Image: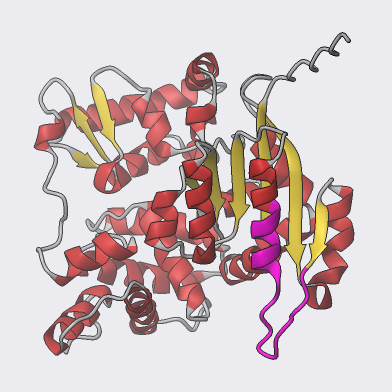
Amino acid sequence: MKESPSPARRPGIRAAMFVDFDNVYTGLLALDPLAAKRFAEDPKHWADALSAGGSAESSRRFLIRNCYLNPVVYSKYRTYWTRAGFRVIDCPSLTQRGKSSTDINLVLDAMDALSGSAGIDEFFIASADADFTSLIQRFRAADKMTTVIAAGAVAFAYREMADSVVESHDFVAILNGTTAEPIRAVASVQPLQAQTAAKVKPKAKSKAVSAAVREVCDFVRAAPGPVVGAMVAHRALTADPSLKTDWGGYGKFGTWVAQIGNGVEYSPSRGGWVWDAQRFSSDDLPADADVEPGIEERVTRVTDVPALSEAQFRQLFQAMAARLREQPVNRNELSRLVRDDCVTAGQPVSRGAVNFVVQGLGYVNYQLNEDATAEGLAAAWTENVEELCRVALMEFDDGEKAALRRWASGGYLAA
């Protein structure tokens, strides 16, 4: 008997999406309530952003789209997700403490997909819950690409096990429509031609961008050494404020500055550095940490807390308090303004570092409003850092605890 021919494989990366609704939604509420609303009511928007690619071969085909939610609390959002093509799995609370069955249902479905005949290439887990670390390990052992979408602090082991992490601020940006570029969470599964095409994209604002490029080139060539990326970004945005939306189509500052050429080199290490390749190299970058070896280095290495100095943290809290007193701003805009203020004050910090602090303040329920003070921000952030250390099982003696509080608070909580 003649065997029927197997169906031709359609182009695109075969992917599966598993969404822990409760975890992501509550995480987004702490970061940006408007983004949380859009996540819950318009899942098609960000799902399409994840699906998009530079070509048919590099785009994703989500063969599985599962959403796990507590129907008692979030049933009103079910219709939005079913209309967006998601299969919604009810995971009610099964214990007196309110623990739902999301974890076990998600893991069982994911393992079925892993062993199934669909040939999934890439698995997306939308959750910051480190309980899924073992699941990510199974995906890697099966040689599958893995991406975590996090709306919250991500445990170090969970982050390192995944091939890629869509960070909270990036996810908020796509939800709020401030990122024109589709999210390419795992570039390594795209064909080489697609990756090359993505890097060599036309710039729509050649005149405006060239002004920023000239400013960056002049600034870097006149600098006495490698320059912190935040300072270079500030100069570029001063020359062309329109770049703040999506960096001329490149999505992020690092990607934009890396393609400038003309002897301008960029490294994302330790917050990002830019230098004149004719006079310097990566060997001229400063040592691994700008803080003195000790408690700060241990904490930043284990918990992902930004490796800022005590003075940088202090300036960050002062700038944030000042901005909050001026006028209400959304958290995405707040991080940009605070970054710029710190650069102007001579204590440059990256926008990613500011976002991490803002996120941490949300976890301890500190209200970012006009009543916020630098001292209050410092105390709340230090509480968050101490909790991160506790979760990471870090142990300190009394002297180290005092040093930790002094450093994380920018000196406001000096022993």
Q: Quick check: 62 left or right of 386?
A: right
Position of 199 relative to 156 (above/below): above
Left or right, 31 with reference to 277: right
Do we see residue 325 in this rendering? Answer: no
Q: Nearer the viewer, residue 338 or 63?
A: 63
Point out the stretch of residues depicted in magenta.
Answer: 91-109
Q: Residue at x 33, y 66 (%)?
A: 316
| Residue 205: percent from left, percent from top | 54, 23
Please tell me which residue lies in front, 103 or 175. 103
Q: Is residue 376 above or below residue 295?
A: below
Q: Residue furthest front?
A: 1
| Residue 14 relative to residue 200: left or right | right
Nearest the eye: 65 or 358: 65
Q: Position of residue 91 (x, y in %)?
A: 76, 70
- In the rendered view of the protein, which quadrant contains the C terminus? bottom left
The residue under the point 41% across, 38% down is 253
**The N terminus, quarter of image:** top right
Q: Position of residue 388 (x, y in %)?
A: 37, 73
